[in-house]
Amino acid sequence: MAKSSRENGPRAPAAEGSLSGTRESLAQGPDAATADELSSLGSDSEANGFAERRIDKFGFIVGSQGTEGALEEVPLEVLRQRESKWLDMLNNWDKWMAKKHKKIRLRCQKGIPPSLRGRAWQYLSGGKVKLQQNPGKFDELDMSPGDPKWLDVIERDLHRQFPFHEMFVSRGGHGQQDLFRVLKAYTLYRPEEGYCQAQAPIAAVLLMHMPAEQAFWCLVQICEKYLPGYYSEKLEAIQLDGEILFSLLQKVSPVAHKHLSRQKIDPLLYMTEWFMCAFSRTLPWSSVLRVWDMFFCEGVKIIFRVGLVLLKHALGSPEKVKACQGQYETIERLRSLSPKIMQETFLVQEVVELPVTERQIEREHLIQLRRWQETRGELECRSPPRLHGAKAILDAEPGPWPALQPSPSIRLVPDAPFPGSKPKPKPPKQAQKEQQKRTKASGQLDKTPAPNQTMMVAAAGDACPPQAVSPKDPALQDPVAQDPAPQDLAPQDSAHHHSQESLTSQEKWNSRGPGQGRQTPGPSG
């Protein structure tokens, strides 16, 4: 099976040649020899030699990206405020998605705080719900031997994914091992699709932000909900989206559209790697993360918008077109984009303001599909319809359990002292008022409890006496409130480098499951 010889780090350029008929034929970058030399590290001692180099805040070896000094630094106070807001959203996710989705979208456009980015991606993509619906599934796939026809291909691709990142710099290191596990598990989860080379950088980006199991379910959501059909055998979905992109370009930048038409440059020559890898091998890393924040929230329209912005600013003026007289010059211009148009602040602002909607994309999709059927016949790959972002995914596949508010396991009568504790002395006026209340109620103390009253027995080990409680008491109506195992409500965090926050009310019910008494470990972002 044909393979590209090498892959660049976080800034590999776009594909230059047409596809050769296989899904592993993404083009290589000019720095491939350097990447291969670095990726040949085999021992821990060799890897430790690179550990002496400075690492940037994203985990890349300093100097490997070529865009140092162009990062947007968020003030620490602003960052802490954003973290607080995102924690509130994540801990009340169902409520926010149902009533304040626009606010979530605006906060994704501003950028998700780095400390919560992995967790937010899981919630936005629906990977969190998918994991809870399939407990133990990833472990089952991980323990399976896998299809030999894919294992060798995956293993040969491992060292080509971001070789300048500290997670993947060492051959056989924990990063490459987790990447192998995730990609192998997907070939078993969807054997009809198998493995596509473009899935490797997608999975690698996810692994930089979350453990392997969570990364696997986010990869599933990307392949099935956000970009369905992109990684199928014939690449029909990506070809259709190439035609959609080119048609939308006519409205966004007529100059660029006319030039590409005159040069007869097929969209697959420049957009295949952009779209299939979600720009993870094209943009500076800070821009990649901001694009992914919006992509997980708003869906594939963000990918289209980024592509249109790059084309518009690379070929959208007569002066720029004059410098690209032939196909070669045009492709080179798109392979070596100006750092200015890829800069984080500029690019995000352009993407947010570009008026390309889901409705336009779907309308153009129907037009291009009809043309495809007229010229080439029916599509061989029957992919499910793609869903445009987090809201559409939630509406199409809501959680199977109702959202519940946290409820205590033992309810005490108001002002009742805890077992073994001494009652606090009360002020004289408050004591007099309570004495008057007891005097008024003295005539009722000797009455027998009504037949419709029940007795609430204290929990085991509680020294409080039984108390008469009306059946209208919320403790008797809420089955969760009588659960004698309050520890089940505390989520167990399996992420090895993420902060621990409380789960949403839906997750607490989900982690218990109908008829279950144990907690399923869940990740944090």
Image (cartoon, rainbow, N blue to C red):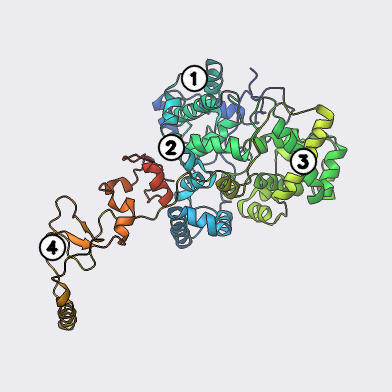
Earlier along the polypeptide chain: callout 3 or callout 4? 3
| Dot in front, 2 or 4 | 4
Residue labelled with disc 2 = 211
Residue 477: percent from left, percent from top: 33, 56
The kind of residue tagged 1 is Gly
- In three-dimensional space, the C-alpha distance between marks 1 and 2, rounded to whole angstroms, equals 20 Å
**Image quadrant where residue 423 sits:** bottom left
Which residue position is annotated with label 1?
Answer: 146
Give the image quarter of residue 397.
top right
Q: Quadrant of the N terminus?
A: top right
Nearer the observer: mark 3 or 1; the answer is 3
Q: Which residue is mark 4?
A: 421
Q: Decide which of 524, 260 is in the foreground and name it.
A: 524
Q: Residue furthest front?
A: 451
Q: Position of residue 70 (x, y in %)?
A: 58, 51
Q: Is residue 419 left or right of residue 161?
A: left
Q: Amino acid at mark 3?
A: Leu
Q: Secondary structure at mark 4?
A: loop
Earlier in the chain: of badge 4 and badge 1, it is 1
